[in-house]
Amino acid sequence: MPEETNLKKHLWTEEFSVQASEDKYVLRRQFSKFLVLTSFGMLAGNVWIWAKSLMGRARPKYPAMPVAAEEEISVGGVKLFQYPGPNDNCILVRPSDDRYVAYSQKCTHLSCAVYYSREHNRLECPCHQGFFGVEDGRVLQGPPPRPLARVVLERQGGQLIATGMLTGGEES
């Protein structure tokens, strides 16, 4: 009878050839296979995200909206308006006789409202002393990380018409 028990024990160990003591260790080949497969999986995921972002970059459609009449604003004058939506405050400035510029009134630091300082000829954010250039909206001083979003203006028959928005990295 002891031989029969030994024989059964021996057959059991042949069916499961992995020793329990060796089961704790990961072989170099298994680890390398895991790293390669994980890397390919991450690469495929990043390619998918990149492809989706390229497909989703449709430019928003902005409505053409009259902002002001040219003679309505004097040199050095300002007019506040909403564009492109009713909750998007913008500021229109006339720095010279023939030039009009408009920007989002939302500071790029913490979204405080910017205002025009005629004596310094700049747009100022009172929250954290952020200053922007009137000519191009670039950051002159302070914590704002990027220029103000610019409103694209067109002149049509003595009217200033807003036709789009340009963020800090875009060219007109």
Image (spheres, rainbow, N blue to C red):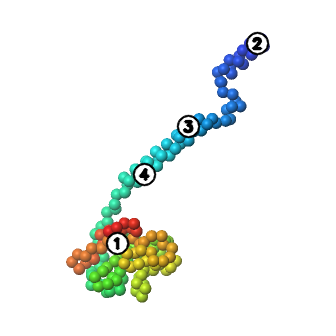
**In the orientation shown, which residue stands out farthest toward the left?**
157
Is the residue under label 3 in contact with that under label 4 (CB below 8 Å)? Answer: no
**Mark 1 secondary-structure assignment:** strand
Label 1 or label 3, whichever lies nearer to me, is: 3
Q: Which residue is mark 2?
A: 3
Number of numbered labels in the structure image: 4
Q: Which three-letter amino acid code belongs to the residue tagged 2?
A: Glu
**In the orientation shown, which residue stands out farthest toward the right?**
2
- Residue 130 is left or right of residue 64, and the answer is right
- Residue 93 is left or right of residue 143, and the answer is left
Per the rendering, the mark at residue 43 is none
**In the orientation shown, which residue stands out farthest toward the front?**
28
Mark 1 vs mark 2: which is more N-terminal? 2
The residue positioned 30% from the left and 76% from the top of the image is 67
Q: Which residue is mark 1?
A: 151
The residue positioned 68% from the left and 20% from the top of the image is 12
| Quarter occupied by residue 154 | bottom left
Q: Which three-letter amino acid code belongs to the residue tagged 3?
A: Lys
Q: Which residue is mark 4?
A: 50
Q: CA distance from mark 2 to mark 4?
A: 66 Å
Is the residue 96 above or below the residue 166 in the image? below
Mark 4 vs mark 1: which is more N-terminal? 4
The image shows residue 99 at horizontal and vertical percentages of 30, 80
Q: Which residue is mark 3?
A: 33
Q: Which three-letter amino acid code belongs to the residue tagged 1?
A: Val
The image shows residue 167 at horizontal and vertical percentages of 39, 67
Mark 3 vs mark 2: which is more N-terminal? 2
Q: CA distance from mark 3 to mark 2?
A: 43 Å
The image shows residue 118 at horizontal and vertical percentages of 40, 86
Q: Nearer the viewer, residue 103 or 30?
A: 30
